[in-house]
Amino acid sequence: MSMEKGCDVYSELLSKLGLEFSFDGSFELHESSVWGSDNRFSEHFLQIVWNERHLVDDPCCLDGSSLRIVHQGTWNLSSGPDFRDAALVIGGRLVRGDVEIHQRTMDWQRHGHGDDPAYSGVVLHVVWEHDGIADRSPESVLELRSNLHPAWRLLLREVEDACYPYSKRVPPGRCSLRWALTDDAKVKEILAVAGMTRFSSKASRIARLAVESGLDETLYRLFFECLGYKSNREQFLALSCEHGLDELREIGDELGVMSILYGSSGLLLDPSRHEVLPQWRERSSEMWHRWWVSGGGRLGITWNLSGCRPLNSPHRRLAAGVSWLIRVGFRPSAWLRRVVGSCVDGRGVFKALLSELDLDLPPWRECQSFQKALKTPAALLGKKRIVDILANVLLPALYDKTLPGYDPKLAHLVSDAYLRLPPSQENRLLTEAIHRFLTPPSRAVDVIDKTCHQQGLIDIYRNFCQLLHNDCSRCPFGNGE
């Protein structure tokens, strides 16, 4: 290939990334690749600028207050402020909280953050340019355009996600070298110990809740909360708090419990006004009638359905909850002691509970909702969701010595079962912890092969990184103490 043709090929490829290629071997970036539609830098690029700390040595906020960044915060990839748990010295005073990034100051008001409690913890508003202070906006505002270090233009080479990976959004901590020099077996041992610490704290929390509400009611509420995972935890908890076990136990039959819970939650449809699947026509009519004559009202629950996989719909998760209540006879603690007590070791406990939580409530294995069918029938709870429920609710409920009916034999069985659990579902916190401690992050495949390792890593991350706001200079892990 000739030099001219080679350059033409590179020119075409690089132009897709906003690069301009010249024959002398150099290239420069068009700023257009990071500009928004109205000729301002995109918020994503501004987030990168903040994350990389490309500021002058002595940045100042709009009110003249000096700013020093102890930790810029952890990049938040879910809803809410852009960076969580930042540690900043503003005007000589140490403040901790969140950071929100916008193109202009008034975007705070345009995006409705002033009335959103999720943004109440924002201590610094970082903007490209200042265009006026919005109502109920953070007291401290930093304008980037007047505080940028000249080297910021180097970032233009990394504006594409392919060039700015997750590992750079959550950089490794100072302790990552110590972790890297520790062999896999020792890392697993450390994580298992930390995992048991976290397991014990969960058991203590359940014991405290049981004092207030009783162990049965506590198990019921926590089980339902766990069904909601990250999107609908509060919704499922609200539903279980509104309809206690005593009420549901008195109703007793499956259809009656379904009528109350689906009707109250707002998930039940009036079949006279809505088309439902053929397999639901008769049952939904009866459910609607029973809920209507009960005189119950709807709780006004708003379900988060965006991004929710069909298999994880609130309708199916609620079906799993009803099926579980029927299976345990509305007495979960007695059921749990019976199942665990029939086993000889932790492996048997895991297998027995895995089988017990293979729940069914016809025809929900075939349906996503009352109106949508699944392409392929599926269990109401996947294996990883069951593991999550075991690790966070059922197994800890027999471990603490202050729990009602504590039995040391059962405590030993559940702790043995916990240490054997395969990995549960990953979440944002675990991903952040992996990138913070493990270099390279792919090492997680070798050292995190059980739930206790996952929980242990999260426990260390919370008790050191998050508690110290990622200030490695104050952390014993990073200082070799």
Image (cartoon, rainbow, N blue to C red):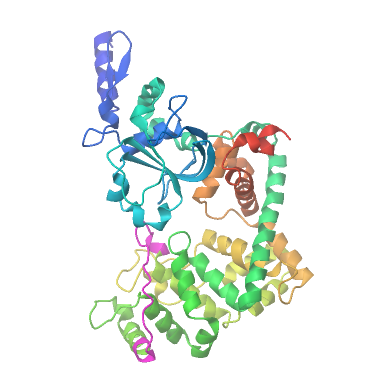
Q: Nearer the viewer, residue 156 or 412?
A: 156
Q: Residue at x 58, y 69 (%)?
A: 355
Q: Position of residue 271 (x, y in %)?
A: 27, 81
Q: Is residue 16 magenta?
A: no
Relative to 327, 196 lies left or right: right
Q: Main secondary structure of the magenta part?
A: loop
Which quarter of the figure is the N terminus placed in?
top left
Q: Nearer the viewer, residue 153 or 450?
A: 153
Residue extending farthest to the right is 408
Q: Position of residue 217 (x, y in %)?
A: 58, 77
Q: Is residue 303 magenta?
A: yes
Look at the picture and state if 469 lies above or below 379: above
Q: Position of residue 319 (x, y in %)?
A: 44, 74
Quadrant in the picture for residue 20: top left
Q: Nearer the viewer, residue 229 or 97?
A: 97
Relative to 433, 23 lies left or right: left
Look at the picture and state if 44 lies above or below 157: below
Q: Residue at x 69, y 71 (%)?
A: 340
Q: Residue at x 58, y 79 (%)?
A: 328
Look at the picture and state if 224 lies above or below 47: below
Relative to 421, 381 lies left or right: left
Q: Position of residue 49 (x, y in %)?
A: 40, 31
The reply to whether residue 344 is visible in this rendering is no
Span of residues in magenta: 291-312
The reply to whether residue 145 is visible in this rendering is yes
Q: Residue at x 26, y 32 (%)?
A: 35
